[in-house]
Image: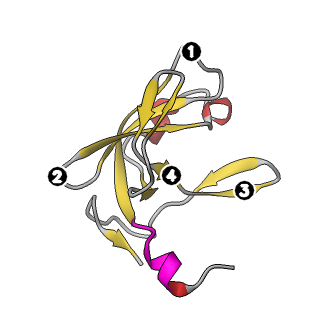
Amino acid sequence: MINIEDFKKVEIKIGKVISAEKIPEGDKLLKLIFDMGGEQRQVMSGIAEFYSDPSILVGKEMPVVVNIEPRKLKGYESQGMIMAADVDGRPVLLYPETEVAPGSIVK
């Protein structure tokens, strides 16, 4: 269990995917570039096996944890983490109900 003050430390914003591609060095990794409302962020995500054509993600908006420490995955820096539901081991991406501006804060 965490308290509300710990939860408040997590910064989640809506990002809009502007490019999505598989990386040759990893079977599971997609490189997603997000418009975060005035800045771009590269996020590496282990969902490639579920998206044979990652270009279908371009234009989608989704919540991104933006204040997580960057880390290298297969030589690529990941500057955030997307949020998804786990349904029987398969990620189900989350999207806003209506279009919102990139960079909008998720509360």
Q: What kind of element bears circle 4?
A: strand
Distance from Cα at disc 1 to Cα at disc 4: 20 Å
Locate residue 34: give its quadrant.
top left
The quadrant the C terminus occupies is: bottom left
Label 2: few (<14), some or many (≥20) within 10 Å?
A: few
Distance from Cα at disc 4 to Cα at disc 2: 18 Å
Label 1 amino acid?
Answer: Glu
Distance from Cα at disc 1 to Cα at disc 3: 25 Å
| Residue at the farthest left position | 38
Task: Tell me where residue 49 appears, x and y as whole percent.
Answer: 68, 30
**Image position of 35 with respect to 29: above or below:** below
Along the polypeptide, which appears first: circle 1 or circle 2?
Answer: 1
Q: Residue at x 58, y 85 (%)?
A: 3
Task: Tell me where residue 2 appears, x and y as whole percent.
Answer: 62, 79
Q: What kind of element bears circle 1?
A: loop
> For residue 25, which numbered disc appears in the image?
1
Is residue 16 a member of the stretch shown in magenta? no
Magenta part of the chain: 5-11
Label 4 amino acid?
Answer: Ile
Along the polypeptide, which appears first: circle 2 or circle 3?
Answer: 2
Along the polypeptide, which appears first: circle 1 or circle 4?
Answer: 1
Total numbered circles = 4
Q: In the rendered structure, are the residues bearing label 1 and label 2 in contact, judged by CB atoms less than 8 Å apart?
A: no
Label 3 amino acid?
Answer: Asp
Q: Nearer the viewer, residue 81 or 90?
A: 81
Q: Residue at x 61, y 20 (%)?
A: 26
> For residue 82, which numbered disc appears in the image?
4
> For residue 38, which numbered disc appears in the image?
2
Q: In the rendered structure, are the residues bearing label 3 and label 4 in contact, judged by CB atoms less than 8 Å apart?
A: no
